[in-house]
Amino acid sequence: MNRLAGRLIARLVVIQLVVWGLAALLVVAFAPRLLLLDERVIGGSARLARGAWLATVALVVAATLVVGHRARSLLRALTVGTSHIDPGELHALYAAPARLVTLDLVATLAVGAGTLLPGLRPDTNDLYTQVELALLAMTIASVAALPAYVWMRASVAAALALAPVAASREAVEMLGTGGRRASRVRRRLLAAVLAPVAFVALGASLLVHAHLRAFDTSSRQNDAAELAQSVLDADDDVRGRTPAIAEARAHGFDAEVARDPALFSVARTDDGETQLTVPLVHGHALVRFQTARLSPGTGVSLALAFVAIAVAGALGSRIGRAFADDVALATRGLEATGVADVLRGGRIRGDARFESVAALANAADELGGVFREFASAQRRAIDARASTELMRGLFLASMSHDLKAPLNAILGFADLVSRGPLSDGQRESVAIIQQRGLELLHLVDTILDAARVEAGELTVAPEWTRVGDIVMPAVLDARALTEGMNVDIVGEIQPGVQRVLADSARLIQALTAIILVASRFAERGHVVVRAAMPAKGEHLRIDVEVTGHRISAAEREKVFDAFKHADRARRHGSLGLGPSLARAIVELHGGAIDVKTTEAGGTVFHVWVPSERTASRG
């Protein structure tokens, strides 16, 4: 179980909270200095800033949970390591960071636009000041989106690495053809170059406008104050007041004098007008002027910003095209490299201009080297296995032939000795020699035929044969080979059974091997061999039943495995050659062997052999 995928949604939420929290701190720290805000605006904006940040965070978390809910089943599958994964879900998870960043910027823009509404905007902030604050917050959020995207992309990539290779390959194919993928690469590189330049350029223009506006406001405010105090503040002579007011109106100052006293104050309206109240000796003066205007300096900064954006767009497009060409070059090189080329060795042709693509080509070359080493080792292993199989076959065949001659001589000599006058002890010793010699001769024949089976050289010559001519000789041979084991072997043949199509010698050999392995499991007990024709079925069934001994399911699986289970060989004196040879012989006849447990607690071997009923229905 991998917890990385299960914690991905929480990780994405934490990443965005950290990034957008730092962005809010940057706005709070630098907005007063960058926009030259006065203390009234700073104090009035504090509460709105907290509310706007909380609203943005709520929208960001909600967007992440919505996107994460769609990928919940995929993340659960990646956590538990399920191999069945929908490639479409992988593709959706791959696109999740871009979607989240887009939703985050939309949420920031929506919250910033909401702060412009009269009910939400503080009384201390006129519309132009609030627009500048919203644009600054959007600019910083846009810049913060880049590290957020990279951080989230790394987390998602770590989760996607847990997906099966087949599902990942299908997800990549869903991106489209090579041309579409190259176009996607170009667009992303263009955005990577264009977006930061656009943010910085527009942010610089915003700062220029804010500084020009602050300077214009401060200078015009000083001019208005001097106008009121020097021209309009006359004790008795008011003859020049009217021409002065008219001249001031011509320069953008709308002034009027009131008799009632008032304190000095500055107020700004939403249409960009500043109202300055200046106390006079007799009453006060109210001077209005416009300050929220686009100056030539603002126009120049905007022009420079758009020039920088255009240059960045051209540069990003060129870089994207060059990178896509490099990727296409590496892709064509990998696709054109065949197995023979990989085994022979050689680098991918073409010089990449980007280090990442060159590193990819080098990694592919190094992977080819690893593959060559693996292929060479595999070839050596295959050759070694073939040589081992050949040597084993030659050894078994040679050993079998070399042993049969002296064994036959020993058995013949023992038979001659047994015909002469012997004492009881001598006769018993000769009987033991004959018994062990027969067992050894049977083992040698089994080894030789097993080698023939592995070499595919064992053949049968089936003929129509009575079942009794197969069952009874097998029973007698097994009795001879198990003499002294205190095991009773009984043969029973159901009357009227069909003849079988079989190679008598080979089928007797197979049935004898099954009876012998049953005798070893019986130890001190009975082995019953029955031949019967089932009411339903086309094959004759020969049952070899061991009474009173149940073979476990695990043991039944090992019966027919040659050379694989030394523990069974120690207990039952067999390496599985006999049963495996018997199964091969029966299958050559078109039959089968299986092992079952009887209701009485014993074990029975079923040997199925084609009969006359099979031939008549065929």
Image: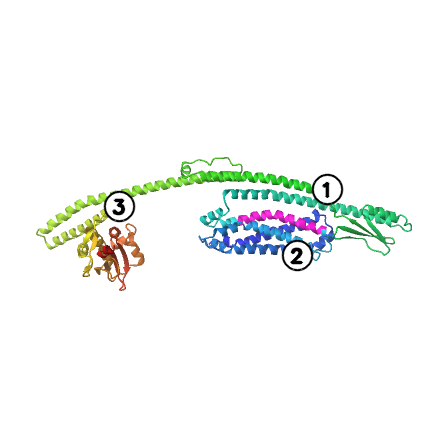
Q: Nearer the viewer, residue 524 or 301?
A: 301
Residue wearing tag 2: 51
Report whether residue 297 is seen: yes
Q: Nearer the viewer, residue 525 or 244?
A: 244
The Cα–Cα distance between marks 3 and 2, rounded to whole angstroms, is: 85 Å
Residue wearing tag 3: 456
- Answer with left or right where residue 315 lies relative to residue 492: right
The Cα–Cα distance between marks 1 and 2, rounded to whole angstroms, is: 34 Å
Q: Secondary structure at mark 1?
A: helix
Residue wearing tag 1: 297
Tell me the quadrant of the picture where the C terminus can be found: bottom left
Residue at x 50% of width, y 42% of height? 178
Mark 2: amino acid: Gly
Q: Position of residue 26 (x, y in %)?
A: 65, 49
The residue most toward the left is 421
- Answer with left or right where residue 385 lies relative to residue 473: right
Report whether residue 483 is seen: no
Mark 3: amino acid: Gly
